[in-house]
Every structure is written in C-alpha cells, then in structure tokens.
Amino acid sequence: TYVCLTRSLVLLASITWEEKKYEDGVKWRFLEHNGPYFPPDYQPLPDNVHFYYDGKKVKLSLAAEEVALFFAQMLDHEYTTKKVFRENYFKDWRKEMTHEERSLIKNLDKCDFGEIHAMHKAKVEARKNMTKEEKLAVKEANQKIVDEYGFCLLDHHKERIGNFKIEPPGLFRGRGEHPKQGMLKKRIQPEDVIINCKASIPVPPAGHHWKEVRHDNTVTWLASWTENIQGSIKYIMLNANSKLKGEKDWEKYEVARKLKSCVDDIRNQYHQDLKSKQMGTRQRAVALYFIDKLALRAGNEKEEGETADTVGCCSLRVEHITLHEQLDGSECVVEFDFLGKDSIRYYNKVPVIRKVFKNLKLFMENKQPGDDLFDRLNTNMLNKHLSSLMPGLTAKVFRTYNASITLQQQLKELTNKSDNVAEKLLSYNRANRAVAILCNHQRAPPKTFDQSMANLQAKIDARKEHLALAKTELKQAKKEAKAKAVKRCEEQLLKMEVQATDREENKQIALGTSKLNYLDPRISVAWSKNVEVPVEKIYNKSQRDKFAWAIDMTEADFEF
DNA sequence: CCCGCCACTTAGGAGGTGTATT
DNA sequence: AATACACCTCCTAAGTGGCGGG
C-alpha cells in the first residue's frame, strides 16, 4: 500500500502542479534570494533621557543601555513584576554591563527606568498620531524592504518568503511559567547566519560576512541561525502560499484521508490491545484511545527546567487525571486537568469504556502524583507502532483526521439548503467551532467582549423598534416601497441576531488554528460550492492564497 | 535503545489596518 | 472627520517526528 500511496501522490502531484517531483529528499534545483533582512542598529537615548540608580543619575554604556531599554519598554506588562522574569533579566543585563556598572548596579529594585519608559510611551503615541503622509511614507519604506528581501526564486517560480526578517534582540517572553522568561535574546549578526542557496550568493551587510554558505537542496530553508535561549535553530522559510508548502500541505491531508480508510481496523486493534498481557501494549492502547477520541497531542518528553511544565498524551502524569466510578450520571469518567502546548489548560470530563478505566486504575497503582501515567511508553514507540499499521501514520495524523472528518460531518448535519447566507455561515462557523473545541484551541476572551456584546444587543433592540415602526407604516400605506423597507429591515435584524449568537458562542474559542492547520480545505471548498456560498465568505485573501491548490482542484462532490 | 540534533508544523497574542458607524 | 471595533498580519514560541551515531 505504501508504494501505491506514494505513486498516487506523485501522479496526482504531477497533474496538479504540472511538474515532476524530484528524487528522494530533493526539494529544489535552483534557489536564489537576497538573504535575510537585519533589524536596524540600536539608537542611543537622547541626552535628556536618563537612567537612575538608587536615586542618582547614571550614564550607561551603549550595550547596557540597550538592554535597559528592553526592560523599560515592558514596564506596563505583568511580566516585569514576576520574580523569575526579574531575576533572569537582571542576571543577563549585568553580563552586558561594564566593570564599573556591574559594581555599582547590584539591585534591580533600585533601578529607575521611569524616564526611559516615558520616552518609549511618547514614541508609541507619536507614531499613532502620525499624519496620513507620514504613515504613507512608512508604508512605502516597508514595502521597499518586502520588495528587496521578501521574495526568492525557487525553480523558476518567484515565491514569497514567510519570515525574511532576522528576529530583533529583546527579552525572551516564554508562555506560561517559563523558567527562562526575562533572559536576553541576543542580537543576531551576519556572522551567526548560515545561508542556503544555489546560484548567486546574497551580499552580507557592509563589513560583515556569513557564518557559512551552503547549497543543501534536501531542505527548504533559505537561512538559519542558532538562538541563545534554548540553543535551537531558527529558519527562514517560504510563505504558506508557496508551491513547496502547498504540496506538503496537500500530502498531509492525503495521509489523513488514507487513515480514514483503515481507521476501523486500527480501532479494532487497539481495543484488542487493551487486554494484552504486555503492560507496554496496554499502555499504548490506552494512549491511542485518548489520542483518537480526544485528539490529544503525542506528548514528547521535554528537558526539565528548560521549558514550562506542559504535557501531551504520552507525557501525562498521574496528577493530571482523576478517576470517577460515577460522575454526573455517567460511569467510568476520567477527569483531565493539565497544561498542554503553550500552557493552555486542558480540562475535560470524559466517560470512557470500562476496559480503559480499569487499565488506568492499574497504571496508577503504587505511583506518586508526579509519576508518569504511561511509564512503559513514549512517542517514539507509539509512532513506530503506528507506522507499521499504515505508512506515514503518526500520532498527529489522528488530530488532522478527526478534525477534518468532524468538520465534514458537522457541515452535513448543520447546513440547510434553504437558509440564507448569514445562516449558512453561522452553520459553517459552528462546524468549525466543534473542531476547535475538540482540538482545545482557546483564546483569551477579547478585552472589550462584554462591552461590544452589549453594544450589539443595543443595536438589535433599536432595529426591532425600527421594524415595528416600519410595519405600522406598511399597514397604513400598503405601498410597494414600504414593503421593501420592512423586508430589508427584517433581513438586517436577522443578520445581527446571527452575528450576536456567533460572537457569544465564540468568546473563548479560536477558530483560526484549525482552519489553517487541521481542516482539509477541500471540504470547505466543496461545501461552499454545494450550498452556494462564495468561498470569499469563509476564506480571507491569505487563506485563499494558501489553499489555492484546493480551490483549483475541488469539485462539489469532493468527499474527505 | 537512547540521545542530541535538525527540520518542519502548529500556536496564541500583539498590534496594525481597514471599515462601519456616528 | 472621528471613533470604535472586527479582522488580519506578523511574530516567534512551542510543539512533532525523523535521523544518525554511539
């Protein structure tokens, strides 16, 4: 089946993109670009802005001053009140100081960044108050940078680069309780950057040279550097609308569709494995049950102390679940409470089958809260097993598959042909929302949520009044024009009410992530054709660019 | 089998932009 | 023209998973 899948992918790709694929691992033949764009040099503080230590004016060296500004800029943020943030910051800041500065400045609490902070706020304010002409000039300058650095030539296609700018220096802001928050993220020099290309080599900034120039066409990145916080590599890569990324995206959904055809067998298999004599096999089966049913992430191990304490399926600990024989009228309920990716809380009470429940009890026996739930399992073993069941199958494919199949089912269930466009879009959003909830894609409620909800309600009330009035007028006049006015008014009212419902239901849900990363766009395109809703209503410009391949190839009868 | 390294996808928030409303 | 707010783009952190070497 593997050969068959590969062949069909290659075949379909060649039809779609009208170009043959390269041999094993080769991603391109020709690659030309201008290198990354570097952030501007540090501009020293004006003479009338001072830093004070212990009440006394202190003129800082350039390097120390730049890092002081990073802190001053964040002073309104809660970060700067956190102990870990402040300690990390102060330690790293001191490294940038001269001998004299270091021997003087020994306590962050005695540092007064007030004037620097005020200067920063004034700058932000001034930028907001720029004239139209000034704003236009800034826009044009930015466009010039995009024109020069934002594109590359890859195999005769001019492609947009996704992130062509080197990340500027600043203070590291991790998510959640990150042990490294506040550390200094250093300025990247051309000497730190590896260039990947074929053809003409980009010219480094004057007086500088690249760390290395290589010609590796088995990878897709144009430039890379190593960041100093985690020691990980950062890449400059193509935009999502590029041919390279589009093909990869398409392949991802084809693998998920392949899973659809064998998911029943795989489910039967792990149900059998729940009774295995091997503890490892049972743990694998329970983990798979969670991954499939709840769309949990795989849960790779993480280095302790390097990142926030978050987990996925395989890294769940005993303290993250509570077992209830009975709860809210259901039997065998597992209560999940843990921090997942980006320290987003996963909280869910799930009735499970008895075999899973009994296994969980067994796995938790004689363990401490901090012990691994699945002590005989890791993502590597899980993925090895999965790839033996189906080529290309890994834990994350289940998320893609379950997200896409859920969207398709929900759209079928919720959409009525006779609805108007606003109602159809509400159904679409609700289907999308079902997926976002499954995948636990949350957002902080917008700061002005309650206010804007109240405003909308006031508008609805006003419209209702207006409608009543228009109806009275119609009765009296029975004029063609009045009838039209009533009809228009009713439509507007319905539209607003639908909008209010949609917004309320979406308070803490983020739809974008699933739309962009988990939902096969062909499902949405086919739906839009079927129910005659223009695709522009569900995808904005950049989404249409990213999913151009799907918009091109999808017929109304497409089935995931 | 384990570890470290690498390449790539997935993620939420900040802040800018454009549009509707007053 | 001013204001409010919804939507979008950018940013970069935080995941997944493959590979090679000991």
Image: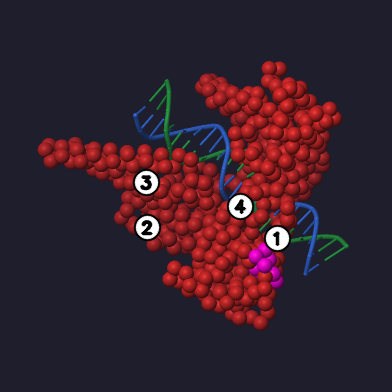
Chain colours: A red, B blue, C green
Q: Amino acid at mark 3?
A: Ala
User: Which tag, 1 or 3, sits closer to the chain's start?
Assistant: 1
Q: Which residue is mark 1?
A: A301
The answer to whether A136 appears left or right of A33 in the picture is left
**Do callouts 3 and 2 mark residues in contact (Cβ within 8 Å)?**
no
Q: Amino acid at mark 4?
A: Ser
Q: Which residue is mark 4?
A: A343
A263 and A503: which one is in front? Answer: A503
Q: Position of residue A272 (x, y in %)?
A: 59, 80
The answer to whether A36 appears left or right of A252 in the picture is right
- Circle 2 — which element? loop
- Circle 3 — which element? helix
User: Which of labels 1 and 4 is toward the front?
Assistant: 4
User: Which tag, 1 or 4, sits closer to the chain's start?
Assistant: 1
Q: Residue at x 52, y 48 (%)?
A: A443
Per the rendered image, the range of residues in magenta is A368-376
Q: Residue at x 53, y 23 (%)?
A: A129
Q: Image quadrant of residue A20? A: bottom right
Q: Which residue is mark 3?
A: A500
Alpha-carbon distance for marks 2 and 4? 35 Å
Alpha-carbon distance for marks 3 and 4? 30 Å
Q: Image quadrant of residue A142? A: top right
Q: Which residue is mark 2?
A: A415
Q: Are marks 3 and 4 on the same chain?
A: yes
Does any portion of residue A553 appear in the rendered image?
Answer: no
Q: Are marks 2 and 4 on the same chain?
A: yes
Q: Chain of mark 2?
A: A
Alpha-carbon distance for marks 1 and 3? 42 Å
